[in-house]
């Protein structure tokens, strides 16, 4: 393992021409060192944590970064903890850590076992998946439903970015070239709450054909005080369903209300016909999954 200055790594090191193009590699020992290296490398530099999205793209030459900055040795980025009304998830927390944590609940806990397959869950990180902004990825949908924030650090300091502002476009986030994601802040409700993630996949470990995340918070009188509904794989980016959320707030949980919200979510979806199914069928799945997710969230909140 090489620490400090970057070393040059390329196909000739493995005796194979089908591996990634040449790149510089360094191991950062602190967030400051990593951010400095990213500022120096600009667009050509990429952070490496789990690498479960980046490395396959590099092997296929879909991504050809000139420099990899390995952040796995940075202390303090692997914590999952509750503080100040939020669940804080560090940049080195693996998907499997989320699934195993007693600190996690609601839609986050519901989604964790659905992330990819065991190999990816053991290596990949939640923050890395969020930063990747794949519209077929699960975590950004869950974070949209729960109203989470991304914590980023750059040369000028730290800032928080609402997940709705962080996800800008297809595989595109709002980070500056010299910023690094160091964690996530997921609100933890002080009262009764619940959440669920429903996912349709062709086989275990597959991307979602359709996914829906729901989050509910109940008021003292038993009506819905706050609601979040978001969808996976039915739009160019992970998308919220604000019409469904507006229908829910202020009303008592019921099957009829959840059916209305499901119809509103389906109307907000923008799926396409493809080998996985027609756009019409995917909207029907959105409606059904929204009803199921809301019913599960309400049952959890009422228990």
Image: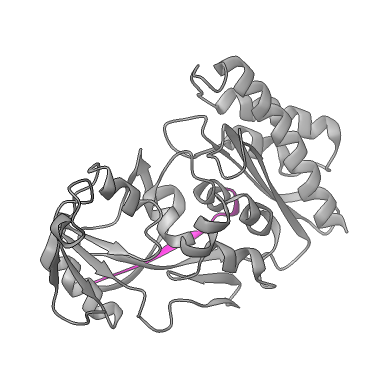
The residues colored magenta run 145-154
Q: Is residue 150 magenta?
A: yes
Give above or below for 290 relative to 18.
Answer: above
Query: Picture quarter containing residue 35?
Result: bottom left
Q: Name the spot of residue 223 as percent of width and height, x first.
A: 81, 48
- The answer to whether residue 20 shows anywhere in this view is yes
| Residue 67 appears left or right of 58 | left
Q: Residue at x 46, y 60 (%)?
A: 124
At 63% across and 30% down in the image, what residue appears?
265
Left or right for 23, reference 263: left
Relative to the observer, which residue lies in front, 31 or 187? 31
Camera-side residue of 17 and 295 = 17
Residue 223 appearing in the image: no
- Tell which residue pokes out farthest to the right in this image: 303
Q: Main secondary structure of the magenta part?
A: strand
Residue at x 44% of width, y 71% of height: 92
Residue 125 in the image: x percent, y percent?
46, 62
Display coloring: one colour
Q: Residue at x 83, y 43 (%)?
A: 252
| Nearer to me, 212 or 225 | 212
Give above or below for 50 relative to 155.
above
Determine which quarter of the picture holds residue 221: bottom right
Q: Quadrant of the C terminus?
A: bottom right
Taking the magenta stretch, the answer to whether it contains residue 72 is no
Image quadrant of residue 199? top right
In the image, residue 122 sits, relative to residue 30, either above or below, namely: above
């Amino acid at each position: 393992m090489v620490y400090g200055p970057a070393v040059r790594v390329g196909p000739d090191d493995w005796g194979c021409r089908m591996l990634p193009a040449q790149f510089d590699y360094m191991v950062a020992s602190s967030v400051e060192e990593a951010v400095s290296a990213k500022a120096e490398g600009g667009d050509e530099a990429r952070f490496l944590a789990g690498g479960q999205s980046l490395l396959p793209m590099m092997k296929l030459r879909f991504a050809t970064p000139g420099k990899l900055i390995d952040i796995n040795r940075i202390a303090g980025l692997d914590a999952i903890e509750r503080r100040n009304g939020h669940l804080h998830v560090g940049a080195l927390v693996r998907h499997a850590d989320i699934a195993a944590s007693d600190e996690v609940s609601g839609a986050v806990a519901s989604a964790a076992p659905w992330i990819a397959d065991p190999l990816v869950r053991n290596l990949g990180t939640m923050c890395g998946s969020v930063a990747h902004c794949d519209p077929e990825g699960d975590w950004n949908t869950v974070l949209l439903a729960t109203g989470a924030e991304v914590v980023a650090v750059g040369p000028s300091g730290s800032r928080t970015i609402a997940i709705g502002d962080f996800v800008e476009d297809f595989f595109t986030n709002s980070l500056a070239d010299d910023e690094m994601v160091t964690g996530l802040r997921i609100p933890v409700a002080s009262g009764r709450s619940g959440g669920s993630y429903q996912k349709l996949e062709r086989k275990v470990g597959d991307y979602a054909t359709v996914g829906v995340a729901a989050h509910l918070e109940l008021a003292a009188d038993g009506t819905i005080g706050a609601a979040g509904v978001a969808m996976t794989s039915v739009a160019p980016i992970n998308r919220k369903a604000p019409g469904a959320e507006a229908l829910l707030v202020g009303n008592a949980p019921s099957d009829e209300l959840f059916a209305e919200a499901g119809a509103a979510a389906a109307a907000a979806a923008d799926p396409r016909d493809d080998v996985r199914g027609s756009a019409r069928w995917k909207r029907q799945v959105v409606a059904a999954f929204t009803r199921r997710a809301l019913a599960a969230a309400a049952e959890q909140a009422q228990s």
